[in-house]
Amino acid sequence: MKTVVLVLSTHSPSFVPLIETIKGTWAAVRVEGVDVLFYYGGDRLAIQGRDLYLPVADDLPNAGRRTLACFEHLLDTVDFDLIFRTNCSTYIDLPNLRRYVEEHAEPSRFYAGKGAFVDGIDFATGTGYFLSRDLVDLVVSRREDWDHSYLDDVALAKLLRSHGIERRPVPRVVYERARDVRKVDVSQFHFRCKTAPTGSPSRAGDVAVMLRVHEAFERARSHSSTEARSARNRAASLAGRAFHRLTRLQ
């Protein structure tokens, strides 16, 4: 199934280094049948490479409206079977994601992700959820039922539940500190790399975790000591650029 990975993005300065890190690590890996799209708020509809700008406010309270606008744009312009929506504090291994899709995804009524509960609503958290195309279409067609008093991931689940769609579980690894990234399970595809509360002015810890996870995957897929050293050097270079950007923001 053709899959589009959507990254909920923002122009907020503290997130810019994270987005740059994603673009230089996991999103830089080309996988057949998997595309990556970063979507932002803005003052008009525009596309620049893999960046989609939508005429919706770029802040967290409008993440639901931004996501609905992105869904509508995809339905109108992109041939896809499945989306995987993630955010800026998450590392996705695209080859493993494709393998997971091949083994577990279904072409219709497929809503899946790591779960949580709010007000009795079982929802797939915004770090990563799958939606089959028919459900993307359902959500857009019933957008007036979207409850914007909830954050976007909860509102999505509430709308889907009203149509008899229940969440299916998907595995996820969570890292809250860089020093916890020791032995990475490189059979997984979904890694939450959030070390600071939402709204924190610095995401340096998230960047550090993401780079360590990426280095582990590059080591695992390297076929020689030379390639392993090159992987470490690439990770170090990315880390240097990201932390320089973070230092300038502080």
Image (cartoon, rainbow, N blue to C red):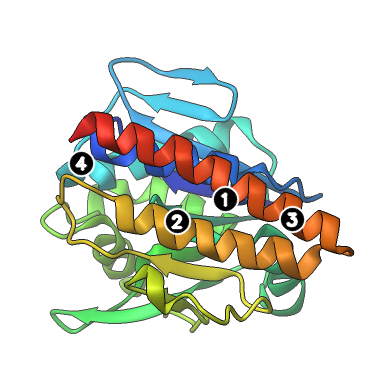
Whole-angstrom CA distance, mark 2 to mark 4, is 16 Å
Tag 3: residue type? Arg
Which residue bears the numbered disc 4? 62
Residue 164 seen anywhere in this rendered image of the structure: no
Where is residue 56 drawn, in percent x and y? 26, 28
User: Which label sits on residue 86?
Assistant: 2
Amino acid identity at mark 2: Thr
Mark 2 vs 1, N-terminal side:
1
Three-letter code, disc 4: Asn
Q: Residues within 10 Å of mark 4 (few under 14, many from 20)?
A: some
- Observer-side mark, 2 or 4, equals 2
Residue at position x 45%, y 64% in the image: 128
Q: Nearer the viewer, mark 3 or mark 1?
A: 3
Q: Report which quarter residue 184 is drawn in.
A: bottom right
| N-terminal label among 3 and 4 | 4
Of the 4 image quadrants, the one containing the N terminus is bottom right
Give residue 161's quadrant in the image: bottom left
Q: Is residue 87 left or right of residue 58?
A: right
Could you tell me if the residues under marks 2 and 1 are in contact, i.e. CB atoms within 8 Å? yes
Q: Which residue is mark 3?
A: 229
Is 118 drawn above or below residue 43 in the view shown?
Answer: below
Residue plotted at (79% across, 65% down): 221
Q: Is residue 22 above or below residue 190?
A: above
Q: Between label 3 and label 4, give the one nearer the viewer.
A: 3
- Amino acid type for the residue under numbered disc 1: Val
Q: How many other residues sit within 10 Å of disc 3, few (<14), some (14-19) or many (≥20)? A: some
Q: Which of the image's four quarters has the C terminus? A: top left
Q: Which residue is mark 1?
A: 5
Q: Earlier in the sequence, mark 3 or mark 2?
A: 2
- In terms of secondary structure, where does tag 4 sit? helix
Q: Is residue 73 above or below residue 71?
A: above
